[in-house]
């Protein structure tokens, strides 16, 4: 015994910049982004394996755009089902249901990907996990934090380089070093909770089984989400939720129902159509907990953060859960990277909470309205207070921008400055950039502007340069090039990187000139460290895409504008072509 | 010594369905296609390694379409440079050059991919080699056939199952079984020859260096092909070809020139622009052999075939080489698979030579005209017989369909029957199907018809069903479903496959109805073994793609048509919706 104690070694101690607890959608999104940004990051999860199926499973258009900014949309879209059409069924007078109308699933016109992508949560996580793995980062599984200590000494909290968190990890799958003490500069908690559904391959004569179908019947409400591999998911409204709540604890008790019960209920709602699981097989099922609360705090001293379901749980009916979680850490990751690299002041981190809390509150407000409409009894002569189909469809269309994620709007802050919004009224400051195809000047390649805005932690400075075929516009642009090249201005002052000053800023130049009027060498050399950086607002040579970008963005063909896009793809500010001072002020307020 | 002889074992003997000699573009295209079709195939090559760079490197639009039919376009397009724009420079009176006009590189309007894709030949081969490898097939390298014997016994030649070829292989990289005797049912020779060029990253003030630039100057002719990784390739006309021909052998002697000499020549042509290799680096160079001949025979007894450069060499100037080679074996592979599986008569193999020889002859005729224009001295007041710029541009546009590969036309044969062409005048029998987006009936997904025509060795029977919202059209379609289901008709008679009779035929149904008028269950059950098989000719719900397919193909909205597409994507025949007898006759003429 004595001997055993004597040889027992103290737990291994280690150091990391960021420790992420929980490998759900928020956690893996953050881990991948930080890893790509060159930040030292670890991610642990209590589960021994990744998810094989089930749980939240819809990627809204903005989430697909975000994944695209990490180069991951293609992998997602190849594996997911694409949902294009929503249909609405309502009660008939003889006790059945009938289709009343249909609508595109995505009503937001500006979505680059105008459909929803459905894939089980494990599949969506896999897309990100594969990217992490390719770049040398793996989730440490079967690992639980048994203790978390945070220093609140003011000098340490203010110093981005201090290891303010001390976390004890237990690695249940290891033979040695089962206990480890990790010192981290920042920690993130992103543990995701569970919702529920029935997944199956259906045997049915319901003609819209491969659409996103909202079915209101007098026997209850359900909706259908088409899935990959011919699966569908049914969300079935529980007519009497009391039945499945344990009266002792107030919590959902899954043992109080069964997939058979859920399907029986679904059959009644679908009448006169019939439905049953093919060969009696249920792929997965559960009952889900709906909570509607926002965490009081998104962070402690801007050193320990929470994200995803850990800070907002809500109804899955609008397919928001995973999207909100991934949006949270997409917002946070670049800010952490800037602070850890010593490029930005700690104050930048405050914008995480204010931007994402407002969004979460909007989400919950939306969800309450939506849930009420969705769960309400339909209108009928006997139920004059019921929800009319028109109310339901109106909400569906009205909230289209919100549910698709493309209309998310961040309020004014150090990194959101709308003073000169009028120069580009449709590139809304605080919102994501509208997709648009421009033509590369050197080789006539049509390029979607989103593909020029990867989440590579750089600010993109988009110079809408006016018409290079016009002498005055050309001379204005040469003046701007001269200004931007001066050591006292932001590109040099905050630019970092020894070669070419492009580590913090990527400068892209878009002329309103037509491609047969000007060639790429007429852009000042400052704007073309590589030929791919200068483009025209023109149609491609086959007339299939492009053209009208200045008009779409509301930018004057000659006066132009400079648009700053944040590393997460949101417009940070707009200014005039001679507004280098404003740019200096903007970047000077948070960059070091 | 005696002991050595006594223990020496006889060479290993083995058996395969197809042995391919040469892993150039034609060889790997064939090997991959046969492997995917489930045919036992081996491929050997004399080179110890795959190509790292150099050699033919342009994929024309039709070749991209073909690669897409094997699921490989994405991998190619991600790695290749995309060439959109062609520009034309001509002499000025003061001895310099100037840009006279520009054109889309691809003038064929119907190309699905309206650009050229440039990537070194090794990179293009890699795309196919990776697919082979994923499905368990590797090239056996450092391997040379030292003897080939072909049986010409009539009974063996006629029997697809006979091992008519005996090939002795020497494996230079093996320790054991260095000599092997392979017995093969069929063999293919596809050894590719070498052409030449200069590859480099340029340092230049020539403004169109990232375009496909054709430069005629009084100092000579050259053209530019933009490449991946900022490389360009220059093809420089040799002003005095005699200089580099060895007078003893009549063959090209690379030692008689140098990259320096080639670049000096290029500099003169580019004047007044300047050009030089960046940092003096030449990536790769060679001089190419141009031969213009068609092999007398494409096969011996339809048991030993040749493909690619082995049967037609020609000028690389139109970027045809690799495209013609891959087109050859794309044409051959499904035919070999049908014969080897016992699905088709040996006579099917005759169509390989007649289809591809005609194409090769067209290619050479084209190449002669093109080379003459390209190599001719430009027109000037002093040279009234010279080629005018208008002649050159006219040829460029006129031959656009041919150079892009989309206008390749196969003449009438057992598998090309144009009797009812008038029912779908723009789906030309003997040509590839025009790209068009249709809308999947069950879930409103927009689908490019090319993605429904993979090279999976199945014939696609496209039923253009008329308007299902119209009673007469619906009843006509139900009659067709009944006919197709009868055991005496072709689907059952030649269909193979125990489950669902879909191993030889894939039946797809396209209604001219709008998607809000009809639902997918109104297609007769015969046409929807899976919901993805029935589609509408309509716009997608976002109005971004689709619609007008019947008009584009020239098919009547109500009368409809049945269109047979061969496994290689070429239209085989067209008939009426009540033309099952014609279909029986067509398939009966070559299927068993």
Image (tube, coloured by chain):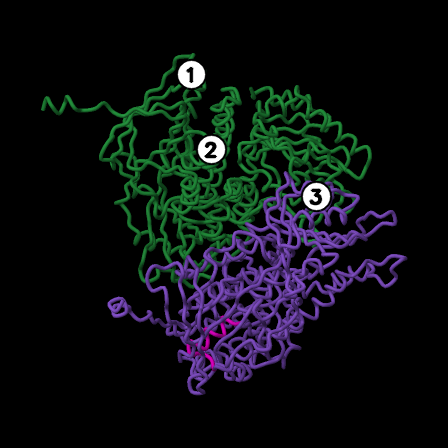
Chain colours: A purple, B green
Q: Label 1 lies in what chain?
A: B
Q: Would you name the residue on which mark 2 appears?
A: B328
Question: Whole-Å distance between the Cαs marked 3 and 1?
Answer: 48 Å
**Around disc 3, counting alpha carbons within 10 Å, would you say few (fewer than 14), some (14 to 19), or many (20 or more)?**
many
Of the numbered discs 3 and 1, the one sitting upstream in the chain is: 1
Q: What residue sits 81% from the left and 52% below the top? A: A100
Residue B335 vertical position relative to residue A489 in the rendered view, above or below = above
Q: Which mark is residue B441?
A: 3
- Principal SS element in the magenta part? helix
Residue A343 is one of the magenta-drawn residues: yes
Q: Which residues are magenta?
A: A332-345
Q: Position of residue B416 (x, y in %)?
A: 59, 27
Residue A572, image x and y in percent? 57, 75
Q: Quadrant of the N terminus of chain B?
A: top left
Quarter assignment of residue B135: top left
Point 66% across, 77% down: residue: A422
The residues bearing labels 2 and 1 have C-alpha atoms spaced at a distance of 22 Å
Question: Residue A549 placed where, x, y %?
Answer: 63, 65
């Amino acid at each position: 015994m004595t001997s055993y104690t004597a040889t027992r070694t103290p737990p291994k101690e280690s150091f990391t910049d960021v420790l992420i607890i929980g490998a759900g959608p928020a956690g893996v999104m953050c881990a991948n982004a930080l890893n790509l940004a060159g930040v030292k990051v670890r991610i642990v999860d209590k589960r021994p394996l990744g998810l094989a199926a089930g749980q939240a499973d819809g990627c809204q258009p903005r989430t697909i755009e975000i994944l695209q900014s990490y180069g991951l949309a293609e992998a997602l879209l190849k594996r997911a089902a694409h949902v294009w059409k929503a249909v609405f069924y309502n009660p008939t007078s003889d006790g059945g249901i009938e289709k009343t109308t249909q609508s595109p699933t995505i009503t937001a016109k500006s979505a680059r990907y105008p459909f929803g992508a459905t894939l089980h949560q494990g599949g969506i996580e896999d897309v990100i996990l594969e990217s992490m793995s390719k770049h040398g980062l793996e989730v440490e599984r079967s690992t639980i934090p048994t203790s978390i200590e945070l220093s609140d000494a003011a000098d340490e909290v203010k110093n981005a380089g201090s290891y303010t968190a001390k976390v004890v990890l237990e690695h249940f799958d290891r033979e040695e070093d089962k206990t480890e003490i990790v010192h981290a500069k920042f920690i993130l908690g992103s543990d995701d909770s569970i919702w529920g559904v029935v997944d199956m391959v259906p045997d049915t004569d319901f003609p819209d089984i491969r659409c996103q179908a909202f079915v209101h019947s007098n026997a209850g409400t359900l909706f259908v989400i088409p899935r990959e591999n011919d699966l569908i998911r049914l969300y079935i409204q529980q007519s009497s939720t009391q039945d499945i709540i344990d009266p002792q604890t107030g919590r959902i008790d899954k043992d109080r129902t069964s997939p058979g019960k859920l399907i029986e209920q679904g059959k009644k709602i679908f009448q006169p159509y019939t439905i049953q699981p093919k060969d009696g097989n249920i792929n997965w099922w559960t009952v889900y907990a709906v909570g509607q609360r926002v965490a009081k705090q998104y962070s402690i001293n801007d050193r320990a953060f929470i994200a995803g379901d850990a800070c907002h749980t809500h109804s899955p009916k609008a397919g928001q859960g995973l999207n909100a979680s991934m949006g949270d850490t997409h917002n946070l990751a670049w800010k952490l990277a800037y602070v850890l690299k010593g490029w930005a002041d700690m104050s930048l981190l405050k914008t995480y909470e204010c931007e994402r809390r407002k969004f979460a509150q909007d989400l919950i407000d939306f969800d309450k309205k939506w849930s009420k409409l969705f769960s309400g009894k339909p209108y009928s002569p006997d139920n004059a207070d019921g929800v009319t189909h028109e109310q339901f469809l109106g909400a569906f269309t009205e909230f289209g921008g919100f549910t698709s994620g493309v209309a998310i709007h961040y309020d004014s802050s150090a990194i959101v400055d709308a003073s000169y919004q009028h120069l580009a009224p449709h590139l809304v400051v605080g919102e994501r950039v509208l997709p648009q195809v421009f033509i590369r000047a050197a080789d006539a390649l049509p390029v979607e502007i989103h593909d020029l805005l990867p989440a590579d932690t750089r600010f993109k400075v988009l110079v809408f340069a006016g018409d290079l075929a016009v002498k005055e516009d050309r001379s204005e642009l040469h003046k701007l090039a001269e200004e931007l090249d001066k050591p006292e201005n932001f590109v040099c002052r905050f630019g970092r990187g020894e070669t070419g000053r492009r580590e913090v800023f990527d400068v892209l130049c878009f002329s309103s000139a037509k491609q047969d009027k000007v060639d790429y060498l007429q852009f000042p050399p400052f704007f073309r460290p590589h030929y791919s950086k200068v483009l025209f607002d023109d149609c491609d040579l086959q007339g299939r895409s492009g053209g009208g970008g200045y008009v779409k963005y509301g930018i004057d063909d000659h006066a132009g504008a400079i648009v700053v896009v944040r590393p997460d793809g949101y417009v940070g500010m707009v200014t005039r072509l001679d507004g280098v001072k404003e740019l200096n002020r903007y970047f000077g307020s948070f960059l070091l």
